[in-house]
Amino acid sequence: MKSIFRYNRDGTDRARPPRGCVRWLSFVLRMLARLLRGGSRAGAFLWAEDETAELLAAGFPSLCAVPAPLFAETAALFPGRCRLYATGSEEELLAQLRRVEQRFGERFDWDAFLAACERQNRRAARLRSLTAALSALTPASVDARTPQAALRDLQKIRKETDKT
């Protein structure tokens, strides 16, 4: 039974951060939903090189945006893949979008892109409010270099809590 649950026997660092697992799982679930709907086409993969490129790829709802950092090991399986970078000037971004449009015969849907931007903005607002709520719960730090400094800080904290 022990051999089944062995993890990281070599003691190496994790290959991917835990946040990558959520991105990977969301990609796999989107692919499964796509297969169940019967909407998969061969070669309809758009390799998004970073998170901003994934957001930009939301403008192509019929294409499957593959997060390239998470699937770098499988890139060799798709030698003619179309890559999307969200770097450069506005003209360069538009040129990339036109190149993807020509390659797949799909039009960039600005409404879908702006809807994805709005979803990201709502998610960012929720995370900011959560961060603010958590920071309000954090205890005040106490200077622990000397006992006198710690007592002074405790007196300051007590005065601040009495004011509120």
Image (spheres, rainbow, N blue to C red):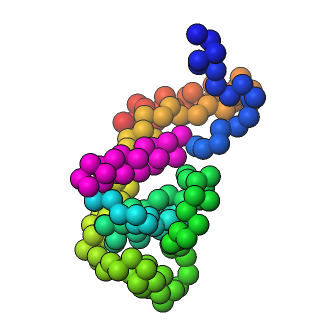
Q: Quadrant of residue 131?
A: top left
Q: Is residue 146 left or right of residue 159?
A: right
Residue drawn at 41 percent across, 47 percent down:
28
The x, y position of residue 112, in whole percent, is 27, 70
Q: Is residue 22 magenta?
A: yes
Q: Is residue 160 left or right of residue 40?
A: right
| Label total for image | 0
Q: Residue at x 31, y 80 (%)?
A: 107
Q: Residue furthest front?
A: 42
Secondary structure of the magenta portion, mostly? helix
Of residue 37 and residue 137, the one placed in the foreground of this image is 37
Residue 46: quarter of image: bottom left
Residue that extends furthest to the top in the rendered view of this protein: 1
Image position, residue 82 (x, y; %) = 51, 72
The relative height of residue 26 versus residue 122 in the rendered view (above or below) is above
Provide residue 140's location: percent of width, then percent of height. 53, 34
Magenta stretch contains residue 73:
no
**Depth check, front residue: 106 or 56:** 106
Say if residue 97 shows up in the picture: no
Residue at screen point 54% across, 59% down? 68
**Magenta region:** 18-38
Q: Which residue is nearer to you in this view: 141 or 164?
A: 141
Please state, as top left, top right, bottom left or bottom right, where the N terminus lies in the image: top right
User: Residue 71, percent across and down?
Assistant: 55, 53
Residue 96 visible somewhere in the drawing: yes
> Is residue 50 or residue 31 the one in the foreground?
31
Residue at x 61% of width, y 31% of height: 142
Q: Quadrant of residue 116?
A: bottom left
Q: Quadrant of the C terminus?
A: top left
Q: Is residue 52 above or below residue 156?
A: below
In the displayed structure image, the side of residue 118 where residue 56 appears, left or right? right
Residue at the extreme bottom of the image, as rendered: 91
